[in-house]
Amino acid sequence: MSVPARALLIDMDGVLYQGERAIPGVHEALGWLNSHRIPHLFLTNTTSRPRSALVEKLEHMGIRITADEILTPPIAATHWLKDQVAGPIALFVPPATLSEFASLDTSSRDPTTPVAAVVIGDYGEHWTYDALNQAFRWLMQDNKPALVALGMTRYWLAEDGLRLDTAPFVKALEHASGRQAIVLGKPAGAFFETALKQIGTSAAETVMIGDDIHSDIDGAQQLGIRGLLVKTGKFRSEDLNGEIVPAGLLESFADIPDWWRS
Ligand SMILES: [Mg+2]
């Protein structure tokens, strides 16, 4: 007999919306969660834009949520860094998300002064040999700063073709320094742990709903959070033929009230 569900973690892309359109029934299901005061948090791996941009995008689809309800890798990293390290932080993140780190001490850019952590995001075209080597030099200093990765996506499809994402640069730094990165993005455990801490429930009484069998379902279930797979977004029927067995399968997010009641 499983513990009753008390809180919900919700993937965004493919669960709440597809492209620029809300998935049918999402407004009603979110209304139901709010009226029943079910604690919930939206989880996304988006690192290229601040939460305010996501809030705005959803508002255009008639979905009203606040930035505080969204956990992104930069926000999870901020929580993690405040908990785990003391001292200045070196950021290699796109300018658009710098504001998400405003509550940390990120002032030091002096290459010879030790930092407490080196944070790697999708720095993209800002990467140069000097920038990568600076991150490496910081990692090699005696104080052994933490290496934090905002996700481990290998590449993405831009308008002009494939582009390197965060993981190849993190891997290069791991390889050179012999250190291992803390990953704060789905499916990494540290990201889901940060979500549980923020929402204040245990893994057993928390449910994750998502359209990605690996990032959402496997990531959550590795920690003991039940995973509900939706048949919207990137879902393919082949997802059910692998080793990962979701705790539940829903047609879409609109079915959440029915699932919860049963
Ligand atoms: Mg998704």
Image: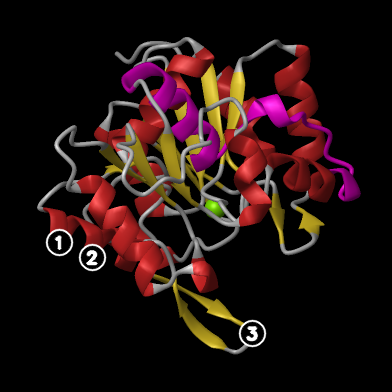
Q: What residue is at 45 percent from the left and 69 percent from the top?
A: 127
How many numbered tags mark residues here? 3
Identify the mark nearer the N-term, 1 or 3.
3
Q: What residue is pinned by disc 1?
A: 176
Select label 3 or label 2 by which is in front.
2
- Residue 69 in percent (x, y) is at 66, 27
Neighbour tally class for label 2: few under 14, some 14-19, many 20 plus, Cα within 10 Å: few
Q: Eyeballing the image, is 74 above or below 175?
A: above
Look at label 3 and name its amino acid: Glu
State the CA–CA distance, disc 2 to disc 1.
6 Å
Q: Nearer the viewer, mark 1 or mark 3?
A: 1
Q: Which residue is mark 3?
A: 159
> Which amino acid type is shown beneath numbered disc 1?
Ala
Q: Locate the C terminus and report the quarter of the image it occupies.
A: top right
Q: Position of residue 49 (x, y in %)?
A: 66, 52
Q: Main secondary structure of the magenta part?
A: helix
